[in-house]
Image: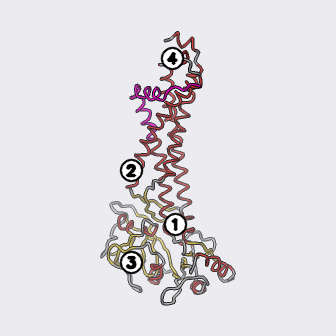
């Protein structure tokens, strides 16, 4: 089968360049929404997965699902202190940290709105277990004091969260003594203080979680089996990275479902627009189609040529929309994590998977919008076409 030259397809797109750009522009807007949704989902996953370390283990009350719902008594925490398989520091102390996590309402910067912020009570061991935490201003809080440090996302998004300023919550004033960068992880959206002071201020008598580092990656099974075999410990034991990955699932799925549903609805308009454009192209070139058939080009060649024009429209729209979406990487946003009900800052993340899925979606719109007009062009009778030439 003789194929119609690609130059013929491209020339026809350029001849109708105003219509081409308008149709491709509509597709580009749909592609932009589609790609942005995927980038948001990837950004949330990146933020929460980066929060966990592969060699750290989280222990929570069985079935808790999140730290704010968990409760570990002091007796249980003391038992976990002696878990086999836990790493030790240079002084021989086990790297086990007992923590409490609570929510606190703070005013957002430049707004009268309030939002939940995660307040974590931890210790110096907790800092050692999270090497991604880097102090960027001020100093770390001192144990036994009402001093706190905040992630940079909290400092950007909320009032009175600067070094030297004071926040009032839990019945006392808390002095902000430092700001830290958590490497775009979920800790950037938290405030940290001394665990005993946080528990006292919020009248908490139990811990939320216990975190410890494994002596080796193979030690996880030993530690898990030991705790699961202790009747005093009805706990969920997970690698920290797995725990935070699960935290992202609900929010990520919601954003994908909502965003992709909107993209599908918008894409119907883009497909109809492409179909109208291609039907108009067929109607204005009936004589040209008859000439192509008379020159020996078969119906299949005509169908492929017109379908190629539609795919060209979708390719242009896809590249423009994807290019616009890639610029969103410079934007940092925040939303409420449905699992913890607290503020979570994240960025749009552009990946090759996002690019591939977006271009596949764009080309699918081109196929759906162009197949029927292309099929119509291929079915035209040669003699009827030449009569209208």
Q: Image point 50% across, 34% down: which residue?
A: 311
**Looking at the rendered structure, which numbered label has been put on residue 124?**
none
Residue highlighted by disc 3 = 148
Closer to the camera in the image, 53 or 312: 312
Please indicate whether residue 112 sits to the left or right of residue 367 in the image: left
Secondary structure mostly seen in magenta is: helix
Mark nearer the N terminus (2 vs 3) = 3
The residue that disc 1 covers is: 340
| The residue stretch that appears in magenta | 1-29
Q: Which residue is mark 4?
A: 286
Mark nearer the viewer, 2 or 3: 2
Residue 116: x %, y % from top left: 45, 66
Q: Is residue 266 above or below residue 182?
A: above
Pointer 3 or 4: first along the chain: 3
- The answer to whether residue 6 is magenta is yes
| Mark 3 element type | strand
Q: Earlier in the sequence, mark 2 or mark 4?
A: 4
Q: Nearer the viewer, mark 3 or mark 4?
A: 4
Q: Pinpoint residue 67: horizontal percent, then vertical percent.
A: 54, 72
The label on residue 327 is 2
């Amino acid at each position: 089968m003789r194929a119609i030259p690609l130059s013929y397809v491209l020339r026809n797109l350029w001849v109708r360049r105003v219509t081409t750009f308008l149709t491709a522009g509509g597709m580009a807007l749909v592609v932009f929404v589609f790609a942005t949704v995927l980038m948001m989902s990837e950004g949330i996953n990146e933020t929460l997965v980066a929060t966990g370390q592969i060699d750290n283990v989280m222990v929570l009350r069985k079935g808790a699902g999140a730290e704010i719902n968990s409760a570990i008594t002091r007796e249980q925490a003391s038992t976990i202190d002696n878990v086999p398989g836990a790493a030790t520091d240079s002084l021989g102390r086990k790297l086990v940290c007992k923590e409490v996590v609570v929510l606190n309402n703070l005013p957002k910067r430049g707004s009268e709105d309030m939002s939940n912020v995660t307040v974590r009570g931890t210790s110096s061991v907790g800092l050692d277990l999270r090497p991604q935490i880097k102090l960027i201003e001020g100093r770390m809080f001192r144990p036994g004091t009402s001093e706190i440090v905040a992630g940079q996302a909290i400092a950007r998004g909320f009032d009175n969260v600067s070094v030297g300023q004071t926040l009032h919550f839990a019945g006392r004033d808390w002095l902000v003594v430092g700001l830290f960068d958590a490497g775009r992880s979920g800790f950037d959206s938290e405030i940290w203080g001394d665990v005993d002071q946080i528990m006292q201020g919020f009248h908490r008598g139990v811990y939320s979680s216990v975190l410890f580092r494994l002596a080796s990656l193979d030690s996880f099974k030993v530690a898990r089996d030991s705790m699961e075999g202790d009747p005093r410990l009805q706990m969920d034991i997970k690698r920290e990275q797995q725990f935070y990955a699960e935290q992202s699932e609900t929010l990520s799925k919601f954003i994908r479902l909502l965003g992709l549903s909107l993209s599908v609805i918008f894409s119907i308009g883009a497909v109809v627009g492409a179909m109208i454009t291609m039907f108009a192209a067929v109607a204005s070139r009936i004589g040209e189609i008859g000439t192509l058939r008379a020159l020996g080009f078969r119906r299949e060649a005509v169908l492929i040529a017109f379908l190629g024009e539609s795919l060209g429209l979708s390719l242009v729209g896809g590249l423009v929309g994807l290019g616009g979406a890639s610029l969103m990487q410079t934007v940092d946003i925040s939303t409420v994590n449905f699992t913890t009900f607290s503020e979570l800052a994240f960025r749009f993340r552009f990946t090759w998977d996002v690019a591939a899925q977006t271009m596949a979606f764009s080309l699918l719109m081109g196929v759906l919008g162009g197949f029927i007009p292309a099929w119509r062009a291929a079915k035209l009778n040669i003699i009827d076409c030449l009569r209208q030439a």
